Amino acid sequence: MFQLMAKTVKQKKAIITGITGQDGSYLAELLIKKGYQVHGLIRRASIIKTDRIDHIFNNPKIFNKTFFLHYGDMTDDISINSLIYKIRPDEIYNLAAQSHVKVSFELPMYTANADALGTLRILESVKSLRLNTKVYQASTSEIYGNSSKVKLDENSVFRPVSPYGIAKLYSFEIIRAYRKAYNMFACNGILFNHESPRRGETFVTRKITKGLANYVHKQESFLLGNLNAYRDWGHAKEYVDAMWKMMQLKKPIDLVISTGKSYSVRDFLVEAMKILEINFIEIKNRKETKFIDKKNNQLICKTDKRYERPNEVNYLLGNSNLAFKRIKWKPKVTFKELVKEMVNFDLINVKKEK
């Protein structure tokens, strides 16, 4: 009688660049739950900002057992190549970027180096080391630029209007070029705007939710830029699930990840104020728009042209039908649920700060 030997399942290894960001933190949680050994790339600085992953970092059952952090930089060839050589990962999720559109006009050279050439550095390392590593590239709806009010899909025309969008378009195209030239598993997720309580405070959604929390608790007003920009807003936690599902396909494909619904910055602001039961008056003139609290006649917020972009993308709306067909992905969190979650998070945290 033959004794059957149990097969040992190899633990998958993944590298996440940009692991301290919103998407990186959610993706790390997801991969750890799925049994991965997760390696995160962080930049060396005088202050290491790890608040989004501190719950993992401070867990002795996980840190340095299934979760590891490594210093490196997307602008440094040697650190990228050394990390990939050392880990020899099954999957690489490139989420690192200078991702603020307005900042990209102020730091165009750095944005191009990190966002465009950073992707190339990863691809070159995988190619030169002759690895079978799968590569996921975090693309963005900003590569479409200004479009008419139609749903954008994988075949829509790309017309980026910012250094960030242009750098991301280079990344998108270099992924496709290496996929075809070297038969690499390399794919792009064209992610439309996705938010959460972990979104950076310089982004407009967190500016609104934290600004309103400060107004409620401290009676402080805040400033915003263009209220008329429309975005397709989803929840980041759902979007990282789409990333992972894309990497489990047998053949790589580029997919749009979006909700299929678009709301303006004004819509986001008004919805947040409704949740907080703030009755307001909107006052417009040529220079600015003000929102005044009806209850006490105090200023809640106003627009300021300093916060507007040199080139604005006015309308973005995605079509994720292909994602539903290929990876069975569709969003569940509604716009109202997303706004409410973010408002409640900032309301609690600002109260703690008092």
Image (cartoon, rainbow, N blue to C red):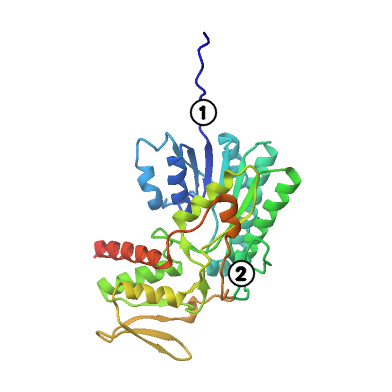
Residue 332 placement (x, y as % from top left): 44, 59
- Give the residue number, with chain letter if any, for mark 2: 162
The residue at the point 38 percent across, 43 percent down is 57
Three-letter amino acid code of the residue under disc 2:
Ser
The answer to whether residue 18 of the structure is visible from this angle is no
In front of the other: 148 or 224: 148
Label drawn at residue 281? none
Q: Secondary structure at mark 1?
A: loop
Residue 154 placement (x, y as % from top left): 65, 60
Q: Secondary structure at mark 2?
A: loop
Q: Is residue 348 above or below residue 310?
A: above
In front of the other: 243 or 119: 243
Residue 63 placement (x, y as % from top left): 40, 38
In front of the other: 180 or 337: 337
Q: Is residue 265 left or right of residue 182?
A: left
- Residue farthest toward the right in the current orientation of the protein: 181
The residue at the point 65 percent across, 47 percent down is 252
What is the CA distance from the residue labelled 2 to the residue labelled 1? 45 Å
- Give the residue number, with chain letter if any, for mark 1: 9
